[in-house]
Amino acid sequence: MHPKLHTSCKHRTFATLFIMTYKHLFFDLDHTLWDFEANAKITLQELYTSLQLTDYGVYDFDLFYERYIFHNEKLWARYRKGFIKREELRWKRMWHTLLDFKIGNEKLARSMDVMFLDKLPTRTLLFPGAIEILQYLQNKGYALHLITNGFETVQHSKLKHSGLADFFRFVITSEGSNSLKPYKEIFDFAMKKTGAAVKESIMLGDDIEADIIGAQNVGMDQVYVNHKNIDPPFKPTYTVTTLKELERIF
């Protein structure tokens, strides 16, 4: 049993408002612990070089990377809303990025998708303090779990290669739960799978819609892991800008 201060690290001081007890901590993976953008950039740089994309007309790698991140986020939003399927998301983020350089080569886009997803999950770049904070929380007796919209095999590969796998008792994915954050069903699935109760659980993630609003809608407290220091549209239960700050909550 761990008494907690119910505060917001950014918006309020750490004055005690009332006592809460959390047993189950549900983390998001990408953009929260595992640095998706940094790992994607390394992987895309390899593809850019090995496939000689300059010969196709991709004249600027930094711009290529920026357009990929833009299209990836846009397509993920459509995927979460059920407008596109998984396979479409995967190859079309490459397709749309190439189209920005006036390259209408579907074969190349599909090939890049396969190569990208073969290499990306082996990357190991984490946000500063990720291993240390998970060890800290584990040592304090919390049950740590993941709720991720990422694909099953890809996410487990990321966990294995980055040294995070042993920290988590349960890994709930969109594929395994047949749902997606922010929908209620994935959180209900997580509660059943882990044996946790909502009131003794808290969601930690970087995405306001998927993680924070999703958890709020099922009555679960939230920690907004705000690496980019962006003002949220409302006040989550807690807000941190570094993983180290979690020590002041838990």
Image (spheres, rainbow, N blue to C red):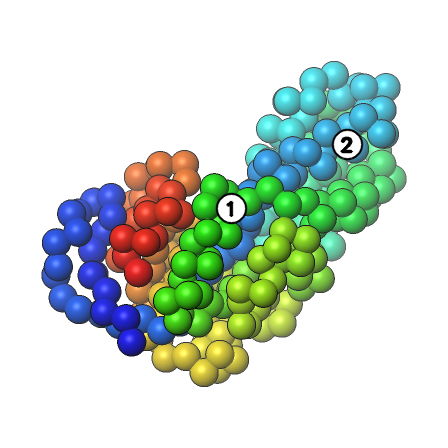
Hey, which residue is sitting farthest front in the picture?
Answer: 139
**Mark 1 / mark 2, whichever is N-terminal:** 1
Is 61 on the left-hand or right-hand side of 181?
right
- Along the line of sight, the residue nearer the viewer: 82 or 67: 67
Question: How would you rate the neighbour count of disc 1 (Cα within 10 Å): few for under 14, some for 14-19, many for 20 or more?
Answer: some
Label 2, residues with CA under 10 Å away: few <14, some 14-19, many ≥20: some
Spot occupied by residue 27 in the image (x, y as percentages of width and height)? 46, 60
Q: CA distance from mark 1 to mark 2?
A: 21 Å
Q: Which mark is residue 31?
A: 1
Q: Quadrant of the C terminus?
A: bottom left
* Image position of 246 (left or right of 143): left
The residue that mark 2 highlights is: 46
Task: For residue 183, say whether it is visible.
Answer: no
At x 72%, y 34%, the residue is 44
Numbered disc 2: secondary structure: helix
Q: Residue lying farthest top?
A: 59
145 displayed left or right of 90:
left
Choose between 241 and 83: the one closer to the eye. Answer: 241
Local secondary structure at mark 1: loop
**Residue at (65% x, 33% y) in the render:** 41
Q: Residue at x 81, y 43 (%)?
A: 115
From the image, which quarter does the N terminus lie in? Answer: bottom left
